[in-house]
Image (tube, rainbow, N blue to C red):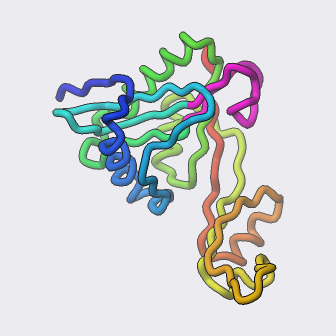
Amino acid sequence: MDIEIRSYRKEDETGWVRCRVLSFLDTAYYDNVFREKERYEHPAIELVAVYENQIVGLIDIEYELEERTVCSRGTGLGGIIWHIAVHPDFRRMKIGNQLLKEAEKLANERNLNRLEAWTRDNLWVHGWYEKNGFVKVDSYLHVYSDHTDEIKGVMKSNIDQLYPVQTFAHYTGENKEDIRKQFKRVHDCFCFEKYFS
């Protein structure tokens, strides 16, 4: 199978969005849907994998020109993987590895010393990062609520007759088990980091 890894082009946007949506459906990010491709404040490495004119994989890495302007940790210039995805019909063909390898080559050319990636609690995704030299270094919780009973006592509106019915929040404290007991949908969000040698 002849997969082309190349730079993202504006005309790829619809295919990029479709690939990302389909890739995320069977992950903990199943409802993290974008209607258009994200744009970045800082420079970015944006690559796609193409098979027969179809986008079958993608990687976006926003990177720093000045330390700690994009990444949440580390020293030196780094990049953060905002999106990496492979269309479900094209998985297990090493497309993600090819995208990462090319992105790392470009990152080295830009004098980056590391990549950072945040992902949720899908163990197969963790395994992929670890096989590719990333190390788990941090975590916090993503907390969702669309249940009125869960929201009471946590959030209220200062506007009369306006009632919150759905929330998404980050929990960075130490009492993670208490949060898991209080809310039905809670995901660990892990930081994986890879330093280049």
From the viewer's side, name the closer residue of 65 and 100: 65
Measured from the top left, where is residue 52 in percent x and y? 16, 33
Q: Nearer the viewer, residue 112 or 190?
A: 112
Asked if residue 194 is positioned above or below residue 122 in the image, the reply reads above
Span of residues in magenta: 62-81
Res 194 seen here? no
Q: Position of residue 145 (x, y in %)?
A: 63, 75
Looking at the picture, does residue 62 appear above or below residue 76?
below
The image quadrant where one finds the N terminus is top left
Most common SS among magenta residues: loop
Residue at the spot 70% in from the left edge and 39% down from the top edge = 137
Q: Residue at x 63, y 23 (%)?
A: 114
Does the stretch in magenta take in 13? no
Whether residue 121 is visible to the viewer of this picture, yes or no, is yes
In the depicted structure, whether residue 117 falls above or below residue 6: below
> Which quadrant of the rendered structure holds the C terminus?
top right
Q: Position of residue 76 (x, y in %)?
A: 74, 19
Q: Is residue 66 magenta?
A: yes
Give the quarter of the image for residue 158: bottom right
